[in-house]
Structure formats: structure tokens, C-alpha cells
Image (cartoon, grey):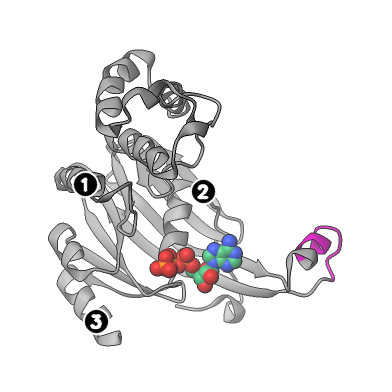
């Protein structure tokens, strides 16, 4: 693999993103030569100045660096890597929270992300209204939402607060609502960061159980980010080890864990 600096011709100089809900495609996710470059300015003032002038100096960091991998339909793959290896960046590209600088990304199927659970909620709307609103954003029909709503509300365990505006919720309560929604909408692709902590210990356990149930469904493709070898072994058949944004090892989960552990 080559880095940006020594690549004469960058593949997909303009990012190409193909995203659809075709869950019959044998490929769930594919990255081809994906690079995500962040610009690091000296401070916020310099960042602001850079919007007006091209002369403001900055450093560049490739959070994803010429990253290529494919996740097949129904496959469960673990991303292993130390802090800053580029795991979250890859997940954010998959969920559309951030865009690559170069490369081609394909995502086929409905993605449910257990990442930033409370992002995107409207604080003036109640929990119930937020569920409906999110359902509309996801393109879920009113009938389907009406079927799903009681399960989401029951799972979230918010009691009377479900009809109160979200501004009255604690951060844990918002995360509960986000988790309840994301896990109830039958995804084709589940993206989950194991570091995710939702609410108190009891609720967190319930969430883990729920994630495990979704992950055991053989039709769901899973991309699982973890530092824990045992969780990766339990659910994933394949592992990808990331370092400095690059894919430095890809193989069976057993081999990937052995590689990762030897490196640390
Ligand atoms: N918005 C940003 N601006 C600048 N640099 C960023 C930004 N987001 C991430 N980075 C950098 O990109 C690199 C990869 O970060 P990323 O969050 O993807 O790593 P990670 O493997 O998920 O780490 P962790 O295990 O700590 O969650 C890091 O060096 C990080 O500092």
C-alpha cells in the first residue's frame, strides 16, 4: 500500500460514494483506496483565517490512509486497533457522518449505527415525537413505525418522560432512547462501537444482550469496533487490524487477534 505523499496518481481523487438499501447485494460494505485527511491548524483562529486565505499553514493527518476492505452480506468483522488507529473514522464514513477525501465507498443496505446515540434529536420534541421524526428521516412508513413504537418505548424504560420534551432528559436517558430506536429498526448492517456505554449498569447489560442478539442474525452484516479480543472472538469470523489509518492485517479473527496482541 502506498501513502498519499508518494502516490503519483491517487485512485478516486474525487470521493465516490454509493449508498443504497439493496440488501440483496452480496457486498454490504466496500472501501477502495479510502483516505480521510484532516487539516490541523495551530488554533481555532488559524482555522477561521483559513476559510478566507489559502496561505494559513496547517499539518495534515490521514485518519484513514489508502484503506481498502470488503464486508460481505451476513459477515461479522471486527476492527482492531489502538487509540487513534482510525476505527471511528472508518465507521463515520460508513454511516455518512463524515466524507472521505479520496476513494470509493459502497454501502448496500440499511445501516443502524450504535455510535453517537443521541445525536440528531430535537430537544423541544418529546421522546415519542422524536421517535416518529427519526422514523420519517429513515424513510420508515407510518404503519411500520406504529408497529415498532411500543417496543421502542418499552425498551427505553423512560416511564412518563416519554411524553416530556427531550430538554428535560439526562444524557443517559437520551442515549437510552437513541439505543432503543437504533436497535429496534431491523438493520441490514449494524455498526457498533463496543466502547459505547448506555445508561446505568443494568441498562447497559440489557443493551449488550440486544446487540448480541442482532449480531447473531446471520443476515445482518456487522462491523464491530473493539479493544477486547474475547468479544471479537465471540461474534466475528474475520478481523482487520488498523494502524495509523492503514489496514495492516486482515485474516481470520484468531489470526487477527494474535497479530494485534503481538504488536502491543
Ligand atoms: N475531527 C478531527 N480533526 C482532526 N483530527 C481528527 C479528527 N477526528 C479524528 N482525528 C484524528 O484521526 C486519527 C484517527 O482517529 P479515530 O477517532 O478514527 O481513531 P480510533 O481508532 O477510533 O481511536 P479510539 O480507539 O481512541 O476511539 C487520530 O489521530 C485522531 O486524532
The residue indicated by pointer 3 is 261
Q: Which residue is mark 1?
A: 202
Residue 83 coordinates in the image, percent (x, y): 41, 73
Residue 49 in the magenta stretch? The answer is: yes
The extreme top residue here reads 143
Q: Quadrant of residue 7?
A: bottom right
Quarter occupied by the C terminus? bottom left
Q: Position of residue 82 (x, y in %)?
A: 37, 75
Q: Nearer the viewer, residue 85 or 18?
A: 85
At x 44%, y 44%, the residue is 171
Q: Residue at horizontal 79%, vertical 60%?
A: 48
Q: Quadrant of residue 146?
A: top left
Beta carbon at label 1 within 8 Å of ligand 1: no
Residue positioned 42% across, 26% down in the render: 127
Q: Are marks 1 and 2 in contact (CB under 8 Å)?
A: no
Per the image, label 1 sits on a secondary structure element best described as helix
User: In what element is the residue under mark 2?
Assistant: loop
According to the image, label 2 marks what residue?
A: 97
- Report the residue at 46% width, 76% height from top: 244
* First along the sequence among labels 1 and 3: 1
Give the SS element for disc 3: helix
- The answer as to whether callout 3 falls within 8 Å of ligand 1 is no
The span shown in magenta is: 47-55
Amino acid at each position: 500500500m502506498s501513502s498519499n505523499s508518494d502516490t503519483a496518481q491517487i485512485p478516486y481523487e474525487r470521493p465516490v460514494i454509493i449508498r443504497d438499501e439493496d440488501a440483496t447485494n452480496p457486498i454490504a460494505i466496500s472501501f477502495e483506496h479510502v483516505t480521510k485527511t484532516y487539516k490541523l491548524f495551530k488554533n481555532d483562529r488559524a482555522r477561521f483565517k483559513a476559510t478566507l486565505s489559502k496561505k494559513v499553514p496547517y499539518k495534515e493527518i490521514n485518519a484513514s490512509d489508502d484503506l481498502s476492505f470488503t464486508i460481505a452480506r451476513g459477515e461479522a468483522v471486527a476492527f482492531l486497533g489502538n487509540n487513534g488507529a482510525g476505527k471511528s473514522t472508518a465507521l463515520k464514513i460508513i454511516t455518512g457522518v463524515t466524507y472521505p477525501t479520496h476513494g470509493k465507498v459502497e454501502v448496500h443496505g440499511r445501516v443502524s449505527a450504535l455510535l453517537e446515540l443521541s445525536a440528531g434529536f430535537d430537544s423541544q420534541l418529546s421522546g415519542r415525537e422524536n421517535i416518529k421524526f427519526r422514523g420519517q428521516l429513515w424513510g420508515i412508513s407510518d404503519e411500520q413505525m406504529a408497529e415498532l413504537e411500543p417496543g421502542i418505548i418499552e425498551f427505553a424504560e423512560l416511564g412518563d418522560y416519554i411524553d416530556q420534551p427531550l430538554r428535560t432528559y439526562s444524557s443517559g436517558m437520551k442515549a437510552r432512547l437513541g439505543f432503543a430506536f437504533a436497535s429496534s429498526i431491523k438493520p441490514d448492517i449494524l455498526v457498533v462501537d463496543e466502547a459505547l456505554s448506555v445508561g446505568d449498569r443494568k441498562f447497559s447489560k440489557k443493551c449488550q444482550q440486544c446487540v448480541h442478539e442482532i449480531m447473531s442474525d446471520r443476515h445482518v452484516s456487522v462491523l464491530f469496533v473493539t479493544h477486547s479480543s474475547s468479544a471479537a472472538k465471540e461474534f466475528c469470523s474475520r478481523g482487520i487490524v488498523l494502524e495509523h489509518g492503514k489496514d495492516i492485517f486482515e485474516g481470520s479473527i484468531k489470526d487477527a487477534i494474535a497479530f494485534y496482541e503481538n504488536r502491543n
